[in-house]
Image (tube, rainbow, N blue to C red):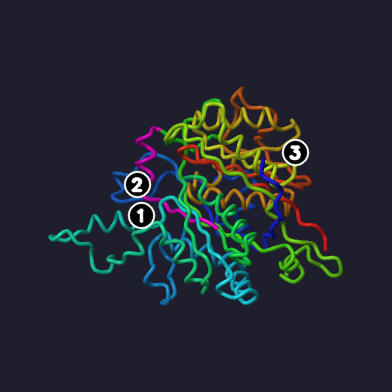
Amino acid sequence: MPQPIPPLSVTAYTATTALGVGKAALRSGLEASRSGLRANDFGEPAGQRLATWIGRVDGVEAVQLPAALADLDCRNNRLAWLGLGADGFLEAALAARERYGAGRVAVIMGTSTSSIGDTELAYTLLDAEGRMPAPMRRSEIHTTHSLGLFVQKALGLAGPNETLSTACSSSAKVFASAERLIRLGLADAAVVGGVDTLCGSVLFGFNSLELVSDQPCRPFDVARGGISLGEAAGFALLERVSTAPTLAALGRPGGGSGASAAAPRLLGYGEASDAHHMSTPHPEGAGAERALNDALARAGLAPDAIDYINLHGTASAKNDEVEAALVARRFPARTHASSTKGFTGHTLGAAGIVEAVISLLALDTGLMPGTVNSTALDPVCGPQIRLAPAHGEVRHALSNSFGFGGNNCALIFGKGAAA
């Protein structure tokens, strides 16, 4: 078992999803159990759109990048720019750059498709000689690392820069990578996050696996019929507890004067790859349970310390069955667990960061979301999985992210101690 790790402060965080731009829109939808899914209106020609429901972010097409970032323009990076501008995150990241120096702040992004939508478009526009249109002959756009390059350039940073692409666990694993870089002295802070946009490869690829529902997804429902795909952008700023500013210094609610509240903290993470199957989880959840055990060990916590679990909960038959069984056997009945895929859609490489943000919101506000769209839980579910939202003290939150190929990640966050 791994040893406990020094916690990291999460001094800023934000998410932009189908529920809207920033944390206020996200919290409002979660509290009201209001889904952001809509009938599929993505892709051209309209007559060839897949009959499904999606979590689409409004306004991405209208985003104008600054001239200095025009060489990295694509739909995915426009969504990244929209997300960076929410909740004062851009300003917080720039302030960290001033505190530590541009070369001491890492950028670690998770994505599954990155800018592949623009690559798809380019291939539909090949000329008679098989060349892309001149404006689309930008090699950086046609790589998974497009997102990492974009965020680093947008923030004027020069530290370590990684893009992780491990399917649906991508932007959960960024927290683990950041912790290692900071603990080993390779960085003093890290901007972590993930962005994935809808594209044909995703919609029709998942449909070819018979995993896409023609109705809004219903996680853990006895009659669930598959996933609803979505897009999102999310970011968090991680710093050492000893050097991170207090909420008061950051100008955030809860800071006050005198004894200042601290930002929420990353306490532990676990990563595992069971490699059971390309697209089906291990039937006993072996990799998922190992990730959970390692996260608890690094956080120095027992399962009964977890108040809220944000489940991976995709609404696919096998994922929900395996995850529900794991939660039922490891956590007490009082633990509040839910899937939020019915609010945002499954945002693939951005799912980890979006659901980490929801877990951080639970710590900051006491809001524990329900599982929207679902009405009758599968009998395999234990009492932990809830359909309705609740409010209460959340001291520790767990976020599960399980990817294709058995690439699993579990994150544990906790409240910061008063200074």
- What residue appears at the point 71 percent right and 67 percent down from the top-left corner? 244
Q: Check the picture and name the quadrant holding the C terminus.
A: bottom right
Q: Disc 1 versus disc 3: distance between alpha carbons?
A: 41 Å
Say few, some or many: other residues with alpha carbon within 10 Å of mark 3 (under 14 / 14 to 19 / 20 or more): few
The answer to whether mark 1 and mark 2 are in CB contact below 8 A is: yes
Q: Disc 1 versus disc 2: distance between alpha carbons?
A: 8 Å
- Residue 84: mark: none
- Identified by mark 1, the residue type is Ile
| Quarter assignment of residue 261 | bottom right
- Residue 201: mark: 2
> x%, y% of residue 51?
37, 39
- What residue appears at the point 82 percent right and 65 percent down from the top-left corner? 260
Q: Earlier in the sequence, mark 1 or mark 3?
A: 1
- Identified by mark 2, the residue type is Ser
Q: Earlier in the sequence, mark 3 or mark 2?
A: 2
260 falls in the magenta region: no
Q: Check the picture and name the quadrant holding the N terminus.
A: top right
State which region is magenta.
193-210
Q: Nearer the viewer, residue 72 or 376?
A: 72
- What residue appears at the point 65 percent right and 63 percent down from the top-left corner? 12
Q: Tell me the element at label 2.
A: helix
- Identified by mark 3, the residue type is Ala
Work out whether residue 221 can be spotted: no
Work out whether residue 265 can be spotted: yes
Q: Is residue 260 positioned above or below 394 on the image?
A: below
- What residue appears at the point 71 percent right and 48 percent down from the top-left corner? 4
- Residue 116: mark: 1
- Residue 302: mark: 3
> x%, y% of residue 184?
62, 60
